[in-house]
Amino acid sequence: MQERQYFTFLKSYADIYQQLNDEQKVLFIDAIIDQQMNGVDAESIIFDDAMLNIAWSGVKPSLSKSIAQYMNGKKAKTKPTTSQIEAKPEQIRSKKKEIRNKNKEIRKRIVKEKTTIENFYPNETSLNAVDEIYPDCWDKDLLNNLINDFKDQARNRKQPFKDFDAGFRNYLKRGWISPYKEKKELSHSQRATLMLSNPLLQYGDDDEL
């Protein structure tokens, strides 16, 4: 191994060192110096003292790692050629363009998935509207029935919804969807309650009829 000028003495080495007696300390430090500075294989260092062998096994992995890092740092690094230097900006531009195109495709896919009726799930405003009309829809099965009823009608709709949630709330307030197998007609008071507690149902949803 090429002559080394220094190495890092970790705190963990010092912690173990402090647990040893004076004679053990000398042997312990000598072993570290031999391994780090003189290239002695850590695996070949064995002590007659069992306590020292235990101490050595505690520092051996980090000592070996330190040597490996030092050796990797000493490897000769080839300088890039002029053509490589000139080609680098073009490679960077090409890579950026590739990443942008990939991100664009991902965004398109996400938007498409979100605007597919199969992936529809009511947002918070729509769920609040459901709670006003069907308070028992906290039950997962009933809520799923309501959502599936809307999905079935949306699939059969001639003109697709511009906004699934707006359409969902319109169908809900008009009593066109229900969580029950046999649909229950909304009472006048139920509709009035829904309209008053959810302003979004009063304005802006009629285009989804």
Image (tube, rainbow, N blue to C red):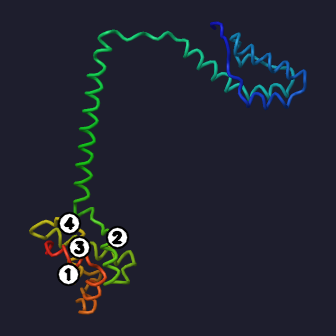
Q: Residue at x 28, y 36 (%)?
A: 99
Please, what is the three-letter code of the amino acid marked with disc 3?
Answer: Phe
Residue 48 lies, in percent from the top left, at 86, 20
Circle 4 SS class:
loop
Residue pointed to by mark 2: 124
- Is label 1 or label 2 in front? 2
Circle 2 SS class:
helix
Q: Residue at x 85, y 19 (%)?
A: 26
Residue 66 lies, in percent from the top left, at 64, 21
Compared with residue 174, is residue 208 higher up or lower down, i.e. above or below? Answer: above
Taking the image as shown, residue 180 lies to the left or right of residue 163, namely: right
Residue 168 is tagged as 3
Please, what is the three-letter code of the amino acid marked with disc 4?
Answer: Asp
Please, what is the three-letter code of the amino acid marked with disc 2?
Answer: Glu
Quarter of the image where the C terminus is located:
bottom left
Determine contact: label 1, label 2, CB under 8 Å.
no
Query: Separation of disc 3 and disc 2 at Cα?
Result: 12 Å
Taking the image as shown, residue 32 lies to the left or right of residue 80, namely: right
Q: Quadrant of residue 6?
A: top right
Residue pointed to by mark 1: 176
